[in-house]
Image (spheres, helix red, strand yellow):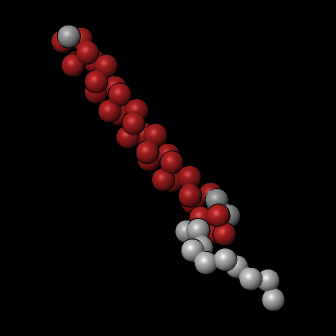
Amino acid sequence: MSIFRQYIAPLLVVLVFIFALVAVSARIFLPSDMAAPAPIEEIRNS
């Protein structure tokens, strides 16, 4: 159990943090229309 607490658990925490950082940072490289929040109302073509 000490091996899990010393090596595996901290590694999992770091991997989850890195994954979250990459997921949030990926918005920089998206086109501007995809990085914006989704519209709530329907867009009408006029």
Q: Is residue 11 above or below residue 26?
A: above
Residue 5: which quarter of the image?
Answer: top left
Image quarter of the N terminus: top left
Residue at 35% in and 33% down: 14
Residue 7 at x, y percent in the picture: 28, 18
Give the farthest residue toward the left: 2
Q: Nearer the viewer, residue 29 or 34?
A: 34
Residue 43: which quarter of the image?
Answer: bottom right
Residue 11: which quarter of the image?
Answer: top left
Q: Is residue 34 above or below residue 22?
A: below
Is any atom of residue 30 visible in this view?
A: yes
Residue at 60% in and 73% down: 39
Q: Is residue 31 above or below residue 6?
A: below
Is any atom of residue 36 visible in this view?
A: no
Image quarter of the C terminus: bottom right
Q: Nearer the viewer, residue 39 or 30?
A: 39
Residue at 64% in and 64% down: 34
Residue 15 at x, y percent in the picture: 40, 32
Residue at 24% in and 11% down: 3
Residue 26 at x, y percent in the picture: 56, 52
Give the farthest residue toward the bottom: 46
Q: Is residue 1 above or below residue 11?
A: above
- Count the marks: 0
